Amino acid sequence: MAWLTRLYDRRIVNVNVNIIVAGVLALLITVGVMHALDTSGLLAKLGGLIPDWSVRAFGRTWRFFGDKVTVTALTFIVDLVADVGVYYLLHWIANHRPSRKAQPKNPAYADLSFMRDATLVQFERAILSPVLYIAALGLQNNMLHRGYSVTMATAVGFAVGICLTRVLHTMWMLRQERVAGRRSAADIVGPDTAPPETAKQPKGEPPQDKQPS
């Protein structure tokens, strides 16, 4: 188990693990919250506040139902808040808990506070989110046209999207670590570093010649 702990202590590993764990836990939290809103009747009340509407685009009419829009919007908000909140907690435990201060940190992130470090991860996830949703929803749509069930198509689509973004995010972090490593090496062995000076002769004394053997 010790080697698993050492492996998890690496930021590039625990970021990927924490993102996946946060996504799963956020999904469970979202399901629980939406179930509670539904059974309490609050979801139906909120849905009645938004009217149905339709939009004409691309040669067809798109109809939007207020109650369905409410469910989608609330699901997105609850999942986003839960995902970010759980990830911040896991990132603090993995990289900024008090016992981590005595351990060496990666030079790419050594100067970052907890908030800046965790927010950097969320920013990188936001940059990669179009890749996630294009891959996930595109594959989902393709599988639905091939006759697969909604559950299967959604599960496979998002699994592939998550794997793809985790690979891209890992490559991004590896590049940051390499750049930081080169910068640190340049600080240690820079252009101003010179070999130690040779011993100087005392002032006023001529250099001593070697005596012939």
Image: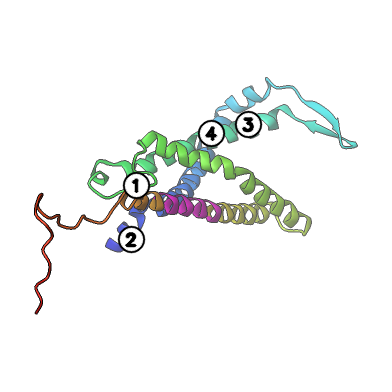
Mark in front: 1 vs 4: 1
Q: Amino acid at mark 3?
A: Ala
Q: Residue 95: image x %, image y %? A: 34, 45
Q: Residues within 10 Å of mark 4 (few under 14, many from 20)?
A: some
Which quarter of the figure is the C terminus placed in? bottom left
Labelled pair 2, 1 in contact (Cβ < 8 Å): no
Q: Look at the numbered disc 1 and give the secondary structure of its residue.
A: helix
Q: Which residues are magenta?
A: 167-180
Residue closest to the eye, 121 or 163: 121
Q: Look at the numbered disc 2 and give the secondary structure of its residue.
A: helix
Q: Marks 2/3: CA distance?
A: 39 Å
Sequence-earlier tag: 1 or 4: 4
Q: Residues within 10 Å of mark 2 (few under 14, many from 20)?
A: few
Looking at the rendered structure, which numbered label has been put on residue 94?
1
Q: Is residue 172 magenta?
A: yes
Left/right of residue 129 with respect to residue 117 in the rendered view: right
Q: Residue 207: image x %, image y %? A: 13, 60
Circle 4 residue: 78
Mark in front: 4 vs 2: 2
Residue 181, above or below 87: below
Looking at the rendered structure, which numbered label has been put on residue 73?
3
Magenta stretch mostly in which secondary structure?
Answer: helix
Q: Residue 161: image x %, image y %? A: 61, 52
Mark in front: 1 vs 3: 1
Looking at the rendered structure, which numbered label has been put on residue 4?
2
